[in-house]
Image (tube, rainbow, N blue to C red):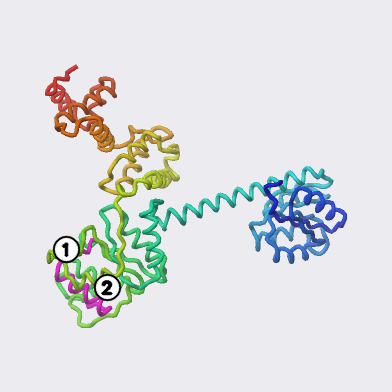
Amino acid sequence: MSNNADAQILVVDDEERMRNLLKKVLTKQGLSVQTAPNGIDALMKVEETPFDVILADIRMPEMNGIEVLKTVKETRPEIYVILMTAFGSIDSAVEAMKKGAYDYITKPFKMDEITIVIKKALEEKGLRKEVASLRNEVRSRYRFDNIIGKSKVMQDVFDLIRRVSNSKSTVLIYGKSGTGKELVAKALHYNSPRKDNPFVAVNCSAIPETLLESELFGHARGAFTGAIATRKGLFEEANGGTIFLDEIGNVSHAMQIKLLRVLQEREIRRVGGAENIKVDIRLIAASNQNLEEAVSRGEFRDDLYYRLNVITINLPELKDRQDDVPLLANYFLKKYTKGENEKIKSISKEAMNLLLNYNWPGNVRELENVIERAIALGRYEEILPEDIPVNIINSRMMSALKETLPENATIEELERDYIAKILKKTKGHKINTARILGIDRRTLYRKLKKYSMEH
């Protein structure tokens, strides 16, 4: 047991001879062994020493081994308990296992039996510890809530989220569509002191300008036709928590003035209302356009921009963090096979190569959609190239063509060579060729005729 030289073992038995014998045998195995003559002494030692395994006799005065097991499992569930008895029965074995015993040995036993059981217990404990450690490492290094990434650029984002979560400061998140701006906003909220209060997300570009003011600030009864009752707005709904305004660059100048007032005064006024209402909110805004450039063009107010731009988080596009593609793809694989299509267990090397060689204009959201689609269409235990959308396959083929053709090749030359490669790949099968190209058969026949490639 040389691998377990640091393992701590506690032997509990009211028979001194048995205690001493077990200590001698186990110490020779390289284990650190302590003994206790009864259950009460054993529990006192457990409070002082982080034991890995307890070897306890069931039949002892004052507190028996089952009671020791029960107490240890309540206070130190990570300790493995092995029970010994000369009065072994199926009933006591079942009771011991139900209460969490690792194993059960009947006296008399050979010393080899004890050492083998302890060795197995220590190996299992070590494996569980290793798995837990790896899971924690993956969780802490590669994930922040539901945001995933091991690339340097994403590690920097995680670090920034951790540092600013506890702050009350306004945060501005930049990122293209599909990069996960709302996930970052949620991570900021749910890792902050406001986490038990509301998180309210608003897509400013999805709500018509005429309705946005009423949605955000609420309205008084009779403020406009159809306002039959006073209604709270989303700023009030978010009171005590966080409000996330996505695509803030799309709001009108009039709305920008109202948002500026909220940030300055921390109060709102409902549409048609007469009183100001104090709100305690943290504002997180997001945009897929550069607001500083929008300010220079006169499209966005500079005073609101400076109020928003206290802390900035820039989310990279997926094409700039290709190292994260396998991690994300496998995460989505597990997400969409859980409890449903469990026959699909992996992504083939060829399919993963297609994913790695694609630019992902739709970013993480597009990758998630591709994996969900592949799982829905997949017929085998792994995702294959045929389960990947045609546009991704075509993108890979075009990249390969560009590497083999001269830089001054025309579009027609690229297309002709591309069709030739696909025909070769499908062994001249025109239906499959048209499917891979993403065109119908008639279009394919026209192109074959155009390039004198008729078979």
Quadrant for the C terminus in the image: top left
| Residue with the most extreme right position | 17
Quarter of the image for residue 372 reads: top left
In reply to whether residue 431 is colored magenta, the answer given is: no
User: Magenta span covers which residues?
Assistant: 247-269
How packed mark 1 is, by other alpha carbons closer than 10 Å (few <14, some 14-19, many 20 or more), is: some
Left or right: 38, with 386 as reference point: right
Estimate the x, y position of residue 252 in percent, counting from the top left: 15, 67
Identify residue for label 2: 232
Nearest to viewer (mark 1 / mark 2): 1
> For the residue labelled by badge 1, is the local secondary structure a helix, a strand or a loop?
helix
Q: Nearer the viewer, residue 396 or 62?
A: 396
Q: Judge whether 331 appears above or below 67 on screen.
A: above
Q: Amino acid at mark 1?
A: Ala
Q: Amino acid at mark 2?
A: Lys
| Residue with the most extreme bottom position | 275
Residue 21 visible in the picture: yes
How packed mark 2 is, by other alpha carbons closer than 10 Å (few <14, some 14-19, many 20 or more), is: some
Q: Judge whether 276 appears above or below 174 on screen.
A: below
* N-term mark: 1 or 2: 2
Q: Which mark is residue 6?
A: none
Quarter of the image for residue 189 reads: bottom left
In reply to whether residue 267 is colored magenta, the answer given is: yes
Q: Which mark is residue 294?
A: 1
Residue at 82% across / 43% down in the picture?
A: 110
Q: Nearer the viewer, residue 319 or 343?
A: 319
Q: Judge whether 323 appears above or below 397 on screen.
A: below
Estimate the x, y position of residue 112 in percent, counting from the top left: 78, 43
